[in-house]
Image (cartoon, rainbow, N blue to C red):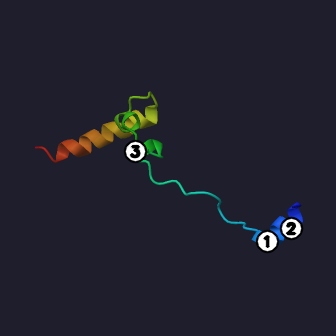
Amino acid sequence: MDDFDLILQNGISFGRGGERKKDDGKVKTKAKKKKYITGAHGSGSAMQKAKYRQQRANRKHK
């Protein structure tokens, strides 16, 4: 069969082919990774944000 006959029999699908991936539990954003939250990766902005997070967490434990 040529491509034209195959298209006539099966039609054309423009949707997503195959199976969709299920959630694998991976973290997709930097902001939720542990190193980013603790400021351990060296970014000045992340270290400052980590400091503020730590101060906020310590407020609950007086």
Q: Are marks 2 and 3 in contact (CB under 8 Å)?
A: no
Q: Earlier in the sequence, mark 1 or mark 3?
A: 1
Q: Tag 1, which secondary structure?
A: helix
Three-letter code, disc 2: Asp
* In this view, the mark in front (1 or 3): 1
Residue labelled with disc 2: 5
Q: Tag 2, which secondary structure?
A: helix
For the point 44% across and 48% down, the residue is: 24
Distance in Å between CA atoms under marks 1 and 3: 49 Å
Q: Are marks 1 and 2 in contact (CB under 8 Å)?
A: yes
Category of crowding for the residue at label 1, using alpha-carbon neighbours closer than 10 angstroms: few (below 14), some (14–19), many (at least 20): few
**In this picture, residue 26 sits left or right of residue 7:** left
For the point 40% across and 44% down, the residue is: 32
Q: Can residue 11 be spotted in the picture?
A: no
Q: Nearer the viewer, residue 33 or 9?
A: 9
Distance in Å between CA atoms under marks 1 and 2: 6 Å
Coordinates of residue 34 in the picture (x, y in percent): 36, 37
Three-letter code, disc 3: Lys
Coordinates of residue 31 in the picture (x, y in percent): 43, 44
Residue labelled with disc 1: 9
For the point 45% across and 53% down, the residue is: 23
Q: Nearer the viewer, residue 53 or 11?
A: 11
Q: Quadrant of residue 18?
A: bottom right
Q: Quadrant of residue 33?
A: top left
Q: Quadrant of the N terminus?
A: bottom right
Category of crowding for the residue at label 3, using alpha-carbon neighbours closer than 10 angstroms: few (below 14), some (14–19), many (at least 20): few
Q: Nearer the viewer, residue 60 or 15?
A: 15
Q: Are marks 1 and 3 in contact (CB under 8 Å)?
A: no
Residue labelled with disc 3: 32
For the point 46% across and 42% down, the residue is: 30
Q: Can residue 2 be spotted in the picture?
A: yes
